Image (tube, helix red, strand yellow):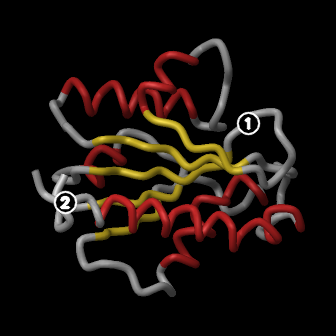
Amino acid sequence: MNRNSKIVIIGIGNLLLMDEGLGIHVINELEKQKLPQNVEMYDGGTGGFKLIDLMHGAEKVIFIDAVETGKVPGTITTFTSEDVYSMYPAKKFSLHDNDLLEVIKMAGLLENLSEIEIVGVQPKTIHYGTTLSPELTDAMPYIINTVICRIREICSVPSV
């Protein structure tokens, strides 16, 4: 991957269900940051096949989502599309993981050769409301830092 390759960051979630909207809250915060010009960010909503269009032409795609890992709320777990394949359906991660898995499969069938990574965060509360739980609000700086560090790592990879 070269340092000017297109990187797409997609936040997934439903802003009306508290921590379920985490991905979109993260995108809103990332938009305030100075990021490299080759980084594009999108509100992916609750997923679906429209995500494939957002991934078009990207060498690296990072999804940000509330992910059920059974860990302490606010815990950040990163994994790849291969991890999703190997663990699904043994373990349900994202609240939309059926959609996300299908999107990953369809992207492969359409020969979208993007490398996919998921930054998942253990939610605390999935209930009607438009704010994050205190646990996820407290974790937000760490989540933002995790995504920014991944972007820096990707952008610092020398051309082959």
Nearer to the camera, 48 or 38: 38
Badge 2 density bin: few <14, some 14–19, many ≥20, Cα 10 Å: few
Q: In the image, what residue type sits under mark 2?
A: Pro
| Helix, strand or loop at mark 1 | loop
Report whether 36 appears left or right of 150.
left
Amino acid at dot 1: Glu
Which of the labelled discs sits on residue 158, or is there none? 2
69 or 17, nearer to the observer:
69
The image's mark for residue 92 is none
Instruction: For mark 2, give the secondary structure.
Output: loop
Q: Position of residue 19 (x, y in %)?
A: 76, 56
Query: For the residue carrying disc 1, how many other residues have a C-alpha within 10 Å: few (<14), some (14-19), or many (20+)?
Result: some
Going from the N terminus, do you reach mark 1 or mark 2 first? 1
x and y percentages locating residue 107 in the rendered image: 27, 33
User: Pointer 1: what residue?
Assistant: 68
Q: Is residue 36 above or below residue 25?
A: below
Looking at the picture, how far across and down is residue 53, in whole percent?
Answer: 25, 50
Q: What residue is at 57 percent from the left and 18 percent from the top?
A: 87
Please give the name of the residue rendered at 49% of the width and 33% of the height, measured from the top-left corner.
99
